Image: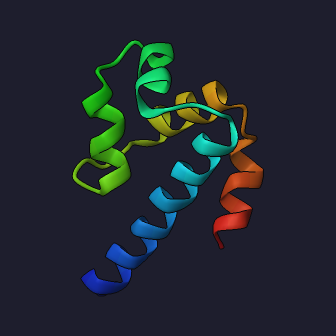
C-alpha cells in the first residue's frame, strides 16, 4: 500500500470520527473528560498526529454512541 493512499484513508477515518463527535454534541474537552484523557489526546488523533489502535477506537465509538460496525461501513 502506498503511503499517500494510507494517509488519505486515515484522514477520512479521523474526519468521520470528528464528525460523529460533533453530531453527539461533544467538544473535544467533553469527550476527553468522558474518556479520562487529556483534551490533547482527542486533538492529536483528530489532526492525525496520533494514531488510534482498535481498542481506543472502540472506546471512543462507545462514548460518542456510534456503532463501530456501521461507522466502518460508512468509511468504505
52 and 29: which is toward the camera: 29
Quadrant position of the C terminus in the picture: bottom right
Q: Give left or right: position of 59 versus 67.
A: left
State the image coordinates of residue 28 (x, y, percent, origin top left): 43, 33
**Image quadrant where residue 23 sits:** top right
Q: Percent x, y for residue 74?
A: 72, 65
In the picture, measured across the screen, residue 3 lies left or right of residue 17, that is left
Q: Is residue 33 above or below residue 23?
A: above
Quarter of the N terminus within the rendering? bottom left
Corner quadrant of residue 48: bottom left
Q: Which residue sits at x=39%, y=42%?
A: 53
Question: Does residue 33 lie above or below 46 as drawn?
Answer: above
Which residue is drawn at the image coordinates 25% and 32% (left, top)? 40
Q: Residue at x 37, y 44 (%)?
A: 52
Is residue 57 shown left or right of residue 52? right
Q: Is 32 situated left or right of 75 in this image?
A: left
Residue 46 placed where, x, y %? Answer: 38, 50
Q: x, y (%) of residue 42?
A: 36, 36
Amino acid at each position: 500500500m502506498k503511503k499517500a493512499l494510507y494517509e488519505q484513508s486515515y484522514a477520512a477515518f479521523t474526519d468521520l470520527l470528528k464528525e460523529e463527535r460533533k453530531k453527539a454534541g461533544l467538544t473535544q474537552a467533553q469527550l476527553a473528560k468522558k474518556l479520562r484523557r487529556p483534551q490533547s489526546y482527542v486533538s492529536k488523533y483528530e489532526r492525525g498526529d496520533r494514531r488510534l489502535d482498535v481498542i481506543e477506537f472502540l472506546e471512543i465509538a462507545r462514548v460518542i454512541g456510534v456503532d463501530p460496525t456501521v461507522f466502518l461501513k460508512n468509511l468504505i
